[in-house]
Amino acid sequence: MAQHVTDSDFTAEVLQSDRPVLVDFWAEWCPPCVAMSPTIDALADELAATVKIVKLDVDSNPATTVAYNVRSMPTLIVFRNGQPVDLKVGAGQSRAQLVKWLETVAA
């Protein structure tokens, strides 16, 4: 299951992580976010050895949301060595597409 992060622990959990991190910027009121949630949680368990997967509720954490210019949900951003390296906006990716993307950008 994906770990939940907040504005207060984003630096420690994401930017200072020793492995790549996928951040799922989501909202409770967002149907595509809710639909993707089981896939994100399953990938968090499946890929735990190589990629850390976390979720950030945009409504409760406006500072991080604004800092990374997140305007649409869901937005998925991969961070490596404290820097955003790639992103996807929207829920149009299948599980297989997400795995392939993460294997490519998180390597």
Image: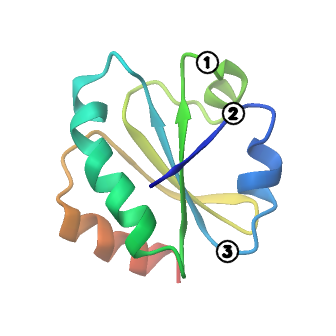
Q: Residue at x 21, y 37 (%)?
A: 35
Give the residue type at disc 1. Answer: Ser
How far apart are the two marked residues, 3 and 1, measured between alpha carbons? 25 Å
The residue carrying mark 3 is 19
Secondary element under disc 1, as helix, strand or loop, is loop
Q: How many marks?
A: 3
Viewer-proximal residue, 78 or 10?
Answer: 10
Amino acid type at circle 3 is Arg
Residue at 43% x, 68% y is 45
Q: Residue at x 42, y 24 (%)?
A: 27
**For this view, does 22 lie left or right of residue 32?**
right
Image mark for residue 34: none
Residue at left offset 54%, top offset 72%: 51
Kindly state the secondary structure of the residue where label 3 is placed. Answer: loop
Mark 1 burial class by Cα count in 10 Å: few <14, some 14-19, many 20+? few
Report which residue position mark 1 lands on: 60
Q: Residues within 10 Å of mark 2 (few under 14, many from 20)?
A: some
7 vs 64, nearest the viewer = 7
Q: Which residue bears the numbered disc 2?
A: 6
Give the percent coordinates (x, y) of residue 21: 59, 62
- Disc with the residue nearer the chain's start (3 vs 2): 2
User: Which is more N-terminal, label 1 or label 2?
Assistant: 2
